[in-house]
Image: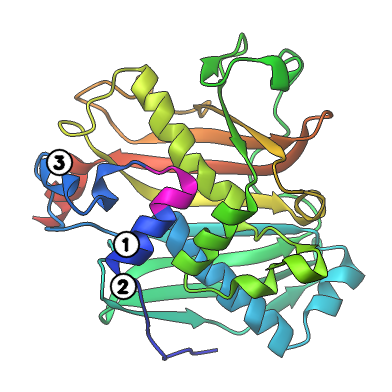
Amino acid sequence: MNQYNPDVFSQLHIDIARNSTDDFNLFHDSRKWQNINGNPFNGPITLGFQLESLIEGKIADYRRQHDEEKLLAEQGLNFSNYQFAFANAIKPNQAIEVDIKDSVFKKEPSPSLSNRIIVKADGKLALTGYKKETAEPLFLDQPDLSRVGELKIQPDRCFLSNGFFLKRKFMMTSNAKNFLCASLRDQTQYFDELQDKVIFPEMFPCALLSSALLEKALKWLHDFERNPMVYTSHKISIDRRCLSQLKSNDAVHILIKPAADCAAHDFGDLNATPLDYECYGLVNNHNALLFRALISLVPLELIRKAMA
């Protein structure tokens, strides 16, 4: 399905998205972007999760318009999977076009419903990928959580004995509403106090990953001005059953560590190569796995060389 009515993020939208997720990345700051060494974007850029939230909303509209929600329930397709590659940054006031290809339903080898996604900004490719609904998560195996213990009593922003960095966030309805508005979405579809409606959108808890990754980098004394990193791809699986049980003020324990096959270095190395991070969001006293994500970053210097 082609959607050619352009959407536009302003700097205000970017600021609201940053504030609602505690994202302090200099790339999105209307002033501090100038402090980034060799920044080729010549201004602030939108958040990756902000764009993905916009896409989430458009696919949800597509599902409703094509009466596909019933199919998801009948087939037990309880996992939302997003895989996106970032081709270019999106700047404030650019016209954004989200092209959702026709749904493809497959029964073999296991049931799935998927849509290819192409996003352009001012006519230039910005993102490609897909959303796929499945009965099991597509990305990352079940993590070994045998030594994490009771996460709610662990200090925030600490390194656990199994190598994970722990960042504790909370599901605040006010932040989720602001994140929806920042993503050009209708918050009343998810929250209504008079009807006691609280439905957290899929991408909101995942968007808290940026804050967690940045705080992990701070622990390693990373220099965000001299050695900036940018996203190259996101692979995210979300358990919608778990998501539907979240309430306001529920804690989300975010666990992060370098992927098993990633380069040995971590943030802080000025000669850094691309980095892949395994990320998990756990909730309630049983450490239920809300989301899992493989987040890929690359030093800005490599992007600059590719753009030269």
Q: Position of residue 49 (x, y in %)?
A: 46, 56
Marker disc for residue 195: none
* Span shown in magenta: 18-23
Q: Which sits earlier in the primary sequence, circle 2 or circle 1?
A: 1
> Is-magenta flag for residue 19?
yes
The disc at residue 125 is 2
Dot label at residue 36 = 3
Residue 253's quadrant in the figure? top right
Q: Quadrant of the C terminus?
A: bottom left
Relative placement, left or right, of 188 versus 129 is right
The outermost residue toward the right is 74
Dot 2 falls on a residue whose secondary structure is strand
Q: Residues within 10 Å of mark 1 (few under 14, many from 20)?
A: some
Q: Which residue is mark 1?
A: 87
Question: Which secondary structure, mark 3?
Answer: loop
Query: Dominant secondary structure of the magenta stretch?
Result: helix
**In this view, 26 is above or below 165:** below
Q: Please report contact status of discs 3 and 1: CB closer than 8 Å, yes or no.
A: no
Q: Residue at x 60, y 13 (%)?
A: 160
Who's the residue at 41% across and 58% down the image? 16
Quadrant in the rendering for residue 300: top left
Q: Amino acid at mark 1?
A: Ala
